Image (cartoon, rainbow, N blue to C red):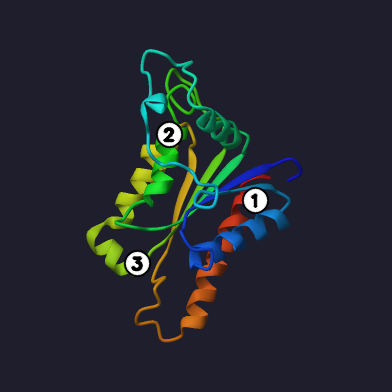
Amino acid sequence: MAGTRALVIWAHPRTDSLTATVTSDVIGELTAQGFEVDELDLHREGIDPIVREADEPDWDDLDKQYTPEVMALAARTMAADAVVFVFPVWWYSLPAIMKGYIDRVWNNGLFYGGGRRPGIAAARWIGLAGESAEAFRKREYDDLITRHLNIGIAGLCGIDDSQVILLHDTLGDDITDPEAHFAALRARATAVATELAETLR
């Protein structure tokens, strides 16, 4: 794995959240597997999620130079062989700050458009959902999120190896053994990192 780079992008306003803990677990396992890991903490790095005119796509100019922040983040992202997103599932989607990062950085002429692709081999989306897997399946929220992230975002940007992993019941409601439950969630996230390393070997 020497020289293999992973960018771990995560979003949560609190550093003592389960999302932060899972992120730390993932980074630890990727590092143990030999990845060079770059951590992009969207909140602590103060990423602006709002697309303003300077970063609006120009459909007639694939070589548009976006703001320095966007160009730097794009270069940082495209330097990775794999990207791992860790986030709480809010309103059955990504948090606004993470969606805004994608809106601004995964931009026309950089990540898609004119056949251009970022060259990222794999993407993993680890979503922490408060509701049960049964509740998600009942309303097909799991399919909705999976299609959105794997096809609507990763697929459009030429990342064919994209997987969505949902960790359910993260609020611990009606869980009889919370300690074992949360340990299992963390273990599943760690396994995602292990499996990713095996895929890229």
Tell me the residue at 47%/34% (across/down): 105
The image shows residue 102, relative to residue 141, as above or below, that is: above
Which residue position is annotated with label 3? 133
Counting from the top left corner in percent of width and height, residue 38 is at 64, 46
Which mark is on residue 197?
1
For label 2, the SS is helix
Q: Where, by quadrant of the figure, is residue 25 drawn? A: bottom right
* Alpha carbons under labels 1 and 2: distance apart: 28 Å
Q: Nearer the viewer, residue 158 or 62?
A: 62
Which residue position is annotated with label 2? 104
Tell me the residue at 46%/21% (across/down): 109
Counting from the top left corner in percent of width and height, residue 45 is at 55, 47
Type of amino acid at the residue the image marks with label 2: Arg
Tell me the residue at 33%/56% (across/down): 142
Identify the residue at the far right of this view. 2
Q: Nearer the viewer, residue 111 or 15?
A: 15
Marks 2/3 in contact by CB < 8 Å: the verdict is no
For the C terminus, which image quadrant?
Answer: top right
